[in-house]
Image: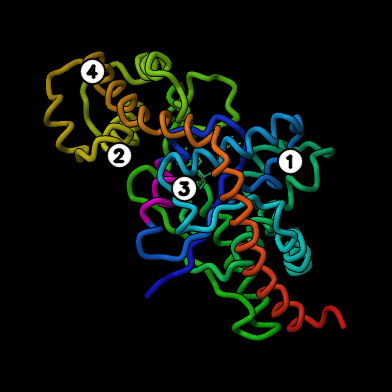
Amino acid sequence: MTKRVFSGVQPTGNIHIGNYLGALKQFVQLQEDNECIYCIVDMHAITLPKDPKELRKNILDTAALYMAVGVDPSRSVVFVQSDVPGHADLAWILMCNAYTGELSRMTQFKDKNRDNESAPMGLFSYPVLMAADILLYDSDIVPVGNDQKQHIELTRDIAVRINNKYGKDTFVVPDGRFLKEGARIMALDDPMSKMSKSAESALSRISLLDEAATVKKAIMRSTTDSDGEIRFDAENKPGISNLLTIYSAFSGVPATELERRYRGEGYGAFKKDLAEVVAESLAPIKRSYAEIRQSEELIRALKDGEERANALAEKTMKRVKERIGLGR
Ligand code: AQP
């Protein structure tokens, strides 16, 4: 049975292989048999200050990257979040049904806020906006990386809470979809932290548009350990295990087979091959991105996506407002 799929990425620049392997790769696979809605979540990007010109450029860059990795706007709805007023509308309704206690427990808020009393309210409440993004489209499945597990749980909790109050079919209760491999790619220079767009060191990540030389530099300098054995052991050998995950995800060769292939080889040879595998996988994405980013088709696709997304969102908002008693 066809399912409704929703997901999004923030247009905060530097879309990296973690975003790709955890989320974007799933976007492409899922469009084969599902009705997919993929959003560039620009309203999430302003929870921390952003240069307006850069933000607008990043929105188009992100949309072009969606298409460059294989998201097809003639099959999937591809649009920009702020083009659909329903997201903010629904977020307010959900906020009135979310608890400050549960939001205070969100680890991403705790990580970014670090007890700062002048942290923007948006940084505190954005998980509710994310819940609105998902519930607005009656989504069944949300393909995301592991770092979003807590937010998906919150979305489910809020949906169930509102369904209990206003009728059980007010919202579809969605499920997260996390890949076995690639759901949590770690930083190359610190395999105990997840790879992130906003990390200060550029050597911590590989961005999808990086040149082959940059990819090689980041991989060759990545943190490993001193025992020299190429073996998957996330707990005791997080660096080499992360590299094995990346190698396996890009090449399709299971980690156990890679362990066998590289038995007795040094980390240097392994890293050199991995750099080639990653650079070769990124090359067609980069080529396709360069074409799409300049084409009129990009703007046309986003305009079409805006219309299709608004039509779906308006239907949900009408139902939800009726249930809650809003309007005349
Ligand atoms: N390291 C990761 N491994 C696997 N998946 C990841 N995702 C993020 N980092 C990893 C997944 O990518 C999708 C888009 O993420 P996002 O743009 O919404 O922001 P994020 O999760 O906050 O990602 P970043 O890269 O760490 O950004 P910043 O530094 O701006 O906070 C999501 O599905 C996410 O799970």
- What's the amino acid at mark 4? Gly
Does the residue at mark 1 contact the one at mark 3 (Cβ under 8 Å)? no
Overall secondary structure of the magenta stretch? helix
Is 140 rendered above or below residue 68?
below
Q: Nearer the viewer, residue 93 or 259?
A: 93
Q: What whole-number distance in Å separates the C-alpha atoms at marks 4 and 2?
A: 22 Å
Is 65 rendered above or below residue 272?
below
Q: Which residue is mark 2?
A: 249
Q: What whole-number distance in Å separates the C-alpha atoms at marks 4 and 3?
A: 29 Å
Disc 3: residue Cβ within 8 A of ligand 1's nearest atom: yes
Of the 4 image quadrants, the one containing the C terminus is bottom right
Res. 116 image quadrant: top right
- What's the amino acid at mark 1? Ile
Identify the colour scheme used. rainbow
Sequence-earlier tag: 1 or 3? 1
Q: Which element is circle 4 on?
A: loop
Task: Judge left or right: residue 9 versus residue 121.
Answer: left
Q: What whole-number distance in Å separates the C-alpha atoms at marks 2 and 3?
A: 14 Å
Sequence-earlier tag: 2 or 3? 3
Q: Residue 46 got which mark?
A: 1
Q: Which residue is mark 3?
A: 145
Disc 2: residue Cβ within 8 A of ligand 1's nearest atom: no
Q: Residue 228 got which mark?
A: 4
